[in-house]
C-alpha cells in the first residue's frame, strides 16, 4: 500500500462504463479452485461478495490484519464469510519475516495461510521486494552490491520456497516507479541497477514455478506517465522471457480528486500483452467527517475500480485494502482523512458495499 493522489468522484463517464461493463462476455466464466476462469457449471450462494465474485469470474479479497484476526471475532467472521481471497497486510513483509538476519519468523503468515485453507480462500503474497518496511539490519547494513544481490536472492528464494504451493499470486516487486515514470531511487536501484526487477521475477519463479508473479504499484489506475512506463517495462520483460505474469493496480483513491475513468482502457493495455491484472489494494478515503455526499462518491469510486476489472478479461482478483474502518491505515497516513473502507467501525455496510454487491450481481446475471 502507499499514499496516492489519484481518486474518484461521481461523473458521467462512470455511467458509460457501468452501461458497457456487463456486455463483456469473457467475464461469463466462474473461477475454479485455483482462481482461473472455469466453465458455467459453478454455482455459489449469492449472499457474499466472494460468492458473487466467483459467479462473475473473479475472486473478491481483503487485506488481513492478523492481530485483529486473532482477537476480534466479528472481524474474523467477516474475513471468513465475505471474501474468497486474502492478502497479508503486513506479516509477509521483510521486516516481519526476517527481523534478524538469517532468522525467520513465519508464525503470523503461516497462521493466515492456514486460515485461508480452512475457509477455501486463495492467498496473495505481499510483498517480496519493496523499498519500505525493510528490517533494520538491512537498512543500516554496509553491504557491497554483490552482497546485497545475494541477500535479495536468498530472501526471495527462502520466502517463496517456504510458502511454495500455498500462494496464488505474489506481489514480487512493489512500487518500483515514481509518478513521472522514472524508476524509484531505492536501495535496490542504487546498488543493483534496474536489472534487479527481472532478477526478482526469475528467482521467485525458480522457487515456485506455479505461483503467479505480479508487479504492483499505485497511481496506475488510468493512462498516465507512470502506467505507461510500467507498460513499457513489462513489454520489455516479456520480450526477454522474464516470468512476469501480472500487473497489480492498487486502487488507493480519495473522493476529493479526479476520477480514473480510463481505467478499463489502461487495464486492457496489459491484457493485450497476455498479462493477468488485479485490483490489489482498493480503498477510497475522504476528508473527515464523513457525510452522505462523500459516502456516495466513495461508492462510485469502488464501483469504477470494480467495473474496470470486470471489463478486463484477464482481471481475476479484486482486493480491498481492509474492509472495516476500525483497522484502516488511512488516518495515520493522511491526517484528517479516513472512513476509507466498505464497512464502518461497527461492521455496518456502507453504500460502497452495496455498490460492489449490485455490480457483481449484475455481472453474474449476464452469465
Image (spheres, grey):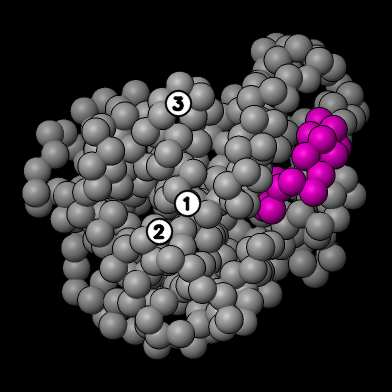
Q: Which residue is mark 3?
A: 68
Disc 3 to disc 2, C-alpha distance: 20 Å
Check contact, mark 1 vs mark 2: CB within 8 A: yes
SS assignment at label 3: helix
Please tell me whether residue 313 is drawn above or below residue 92 in the rendered image: below
Few, some or many C-alpha atoms within 10 Å of disc 1 (few <14, some 14-19, many ≥20)? many
The mark found on residue 49 in the picture is 2
101 is higher (above) or lower (below) than 90: above
| Mark 2 secondary-structure assignment | helix
Q: Is any part of residue 151 visible from this angle?
A: yes
Residue 165 within the magenta-colored segment of the rendering: yes
Asked whether 93 falls inside the magenta stretch, the response is no
Q: Which residue is mark 1?
A: 83
Give the mark nearest the N terminus, 3 or 1.
3
Secondary structure found at label 1: loop
Name the spot of residue 263 as percent of width and height, x first. Answer: 41, 67
Res 271 label: none
Q: Nearer the viewer, residue 207 or 40?
A: 40
Amino acid at each position: 500500500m502507499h499514499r496516492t493522489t489519484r481518486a474518484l468522484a461521481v461523473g458521467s463517464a462512470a455511467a458509460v462504463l457501468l452501461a458497457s461493463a456487463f456486455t463483456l462476455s469473457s467475464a461469463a466464466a466462474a473461477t475454479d479452485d485455483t482462481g482461473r476462469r472455469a466453465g458455467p457449471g459453478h454455482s455459489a450462494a449469492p449472499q457474499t461478495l466472494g460468492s458473487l465474485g466467483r459467479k462473475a469470474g473473479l475472486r473478491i479479497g481483503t487485506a488481513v490484519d492478523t492481530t485483529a484476526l486473532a482477537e476480534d471475532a466479528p472481524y474474523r467472521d467477516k474475513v471468513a464469510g465475505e471474501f474468497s481471497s486474502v492478502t497479508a497486510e503486513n506479516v509477509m513483509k521483510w521486516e516481519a519475516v526476517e527481523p534478524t538476519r538469517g532468522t525467520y519468523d513465519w508464525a503470523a503468515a503461516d497462521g493466515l495461510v492456514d486460515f485461508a485453507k480452512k475457509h477455501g480462500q486463495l492467498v496473495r503474497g505481499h510483498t517480496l521486494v519493496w523499498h519500505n518496511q525493510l528490517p533494520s539490519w538491512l537498512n543500516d547494513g554496509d553491504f557491497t552490491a554483490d552482497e546485497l544481490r545475494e541477500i535479495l536472492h536468498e530472501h526471495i528464494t527462502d520466502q517463496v520456497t517456504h510458502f511454495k504451493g500455498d500462494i496464488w499470486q505474489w506481489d514480487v516487486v512493489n512500487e518500483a516507479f515514481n509518478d513521472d515514470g522514472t524508476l524509484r531511487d531505492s536501495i535496490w536501484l542504487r546498488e543493483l541497477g534496474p536489472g534487479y526487477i527481472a532478477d526478482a521475477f526469475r528467482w521467485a519463479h525458480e522457487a515456485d514455478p506455479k505461483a503467479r508473479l505480479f508487479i504492483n504499484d499505485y497511481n496506475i489506475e488510468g493512462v498516465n506517465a507512470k502506467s505507461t512506463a510500467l507498460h513499457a517495462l513489462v513489454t520489455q520483460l516479456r520480450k526477454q522471457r522474464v516470468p512476469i505474469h501480472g500487473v497489480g493496480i492498487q486502487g488507493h483513491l480519495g473522493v476529493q480528486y479526479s476520477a480514473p475513468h480510463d481505467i478499463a482502457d489502461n487495464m486492457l493495455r496489459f491484457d493485450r500483452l497476455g498479462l493477468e491484472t488485479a485490483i490489489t489494494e482498493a480503498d477510497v478515503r475522504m476528508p473527515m467527517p464523513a457525510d452522505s455526499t462523500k459516502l456516495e462518491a466513495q461508492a462510485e469510486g469502488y464501483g469504477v475500480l470494480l467495473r474496470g476489472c470486470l471489463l478486463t478479461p484477464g482481471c481475476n482478483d479484486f482486493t480491498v485494502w481492509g474492509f472495516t474502518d476500525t483497522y484502516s491505515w488511512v488516518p495515520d497516513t493522511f491526517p484528517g482523512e479516513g472512513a476509507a473502507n466498505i464497512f464502518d467501525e461497527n461492521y455496518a455496510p456502507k453504500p460502497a458495499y452495496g455498490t460492489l454487491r449490485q455490480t457483481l450481481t449484475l455481472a453474474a446475471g449476464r452469465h
